[in-house]
Amino acid sequence: MLDKIGKTIDLHEMISRGDNIIAALSGGADSVCLLLAMKEIAPLYGASLCAVHVNHSMRGEESDRDEEFCRSLCQRIKIPFTARRVDVFDYVRKTGKSSEEAARELRYGVLFEEAEKLSSPKIACAHNLCDSSETVLFNITRGTGIKGICGIPFRRDIIIRPLLDVTRSEIEEFLRERGQDFVTDSSNLTDDYTRNRIRHRVIPELVGINEGFYRAVSRLSRSAAEDEEYFSELLDRLSENEIPDMPAAVRKRFIAKKLSEAKIEAGFDRICELDGIMKERKAAKVNLSGDVFAVFENGIMTVRKIIQTEKFDFSEELVFEDGREIFIPQFDKTVKITRAKDDIFNDSSIIHKKLTNNCVNYVKIQGVAVLRNKRDGDRITPAGRDFNVRLKKLYNNMKVPVEKRGTALVIEDNGGIIWSEYGGASERVVPKKGSDLHNIFVISVEEH
């Protein structure tokens, strides 16, 4: 079996000369086998070995028994040993995670903390071929794509898994040959956890159908991993502009990658929904979680935080006077009102031709002017036009980024909207040549 482990290490380039290997030691058969195997193999690579045990404090005296077993084993075979204690139940109360997930996060947290103390560290975990097959079945029961049937990776960053080509029966035989005992986690004997039910009930049936079940799943996982690697490399080569025109398999992987980077969990149906928007190159925003949205502009998808106007309904009477400033903390913006200068009609970027002018003739305002946030259904008659249009359509035509629209501001009087951020003044109040400059005010918005 040592030859098989050595081939796995070489094939996946797990160990380099001078590495400091941390063996994650629980005291179970798999981790004890890993420790003994690495004690013989590590010197062949000029690597050093130590062991770290994480006491999860979940099984009372049994947890303490496991820690003491690991300490005694390492003392006997002269392997440097560290034990760390974590409180899984307290972490569950604080985070709401399952006990399995909480234990895994805390365990890896400890291992990485210990790795930071070493130069050129590697963390060796004792997952085996049977564990990987169980993971594939577990992912299938939850619903998964190709990535979920890739099984447990042989290496990821500094984590290595030298036993992934070895079955549990081979591990137990290895220990019997050496007369080495191990401890048994009583929680692994019950069917309280989904993974245990797969191990105790489902897999024996599948092995009964095909004695080579584990190898068959291994071949499937390796083939899937090769496909996944190809698609991952393809995504790295493509520009985001190219993604909408690619096949669905590429688009959906791109979407899944974006969501994963943003730490957003999404199922198959949500990814298909987002893919439909991308394929049609629609302009849209889809709420993913809280104030996080998937934003689409011409098919290009980004994941962003957007302040929703439903949360902040701003409205304030606006007095037109030179030098007036209104800070809006909800949107982190300041609106400034300044009286126009003498050369305003010579500046074509302000008055003529461009829709995005920001000047209004004060005398044309009807009643009280109010500054507020944009709302659904708002309409304006743009400067230089003779038709009324929804601001949403106007912003679409102007290609105003979707995330900016949620905090867009407008000014309205008794006759309707006379100015909109990004869209400028309405035809009714836009200054014309010959207007009294004293009555013309420039509206500007400063984002902080």
Image (cartoon, grey):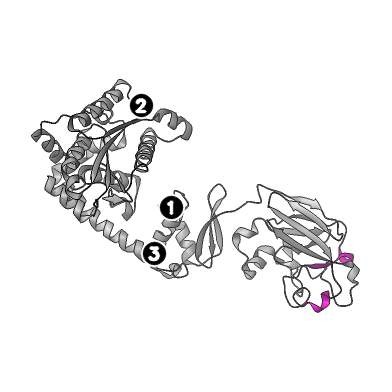
Of 387 and 183, the residue lying toward us: 183
Q: Residue at x 79, y 74 (%)?
A: 351
Q: Which mark is residue 358?
A: none
Q: Please, what secondary structure does the residue beneath circle 2 have?
A: loop
Is the residue 240 above or below the residue 367 in the image? below
Is 365 in the magenta? yes
Q: Majority secondary structure of the magenta segment?
A: loop
Looking at the rendered structure, the number of numbered marks drawn on it comes to 3
Q: Which residue is mark 1?
A: 260
Quadrant housing the C terminus: bottom right
> Quick check: marks 2 and 3 in contact, CB under 8 Å?
no
**Badge 3: few (under 14), some or many (20 or more) residues near its Cα, within 10 Å?**
some
At label 2, the amino acid type is Ser
Q: Along the horizontal axis of the image, is 353 left or right of 66?
A: right
User: How many angstroms separate mark 1 from mark 3 (CA)?
Assistant: 14 Å
Is 344 in the magenta? yes
Q: Which mark is residue 57?
A: 2
> Which contiguous range is marked in magenta?
343-370
Q: Please, what secondary structure does the residue beneath circle 3 have?
A: helix
Q: Along the horizontal axis of the image, is 292 left or right of 211?
A: right
Q: Residue at x 37, y 43 (%)?
A: 116
Q: Earlier in the sequence, mark 1 or mark 2?
A: 2
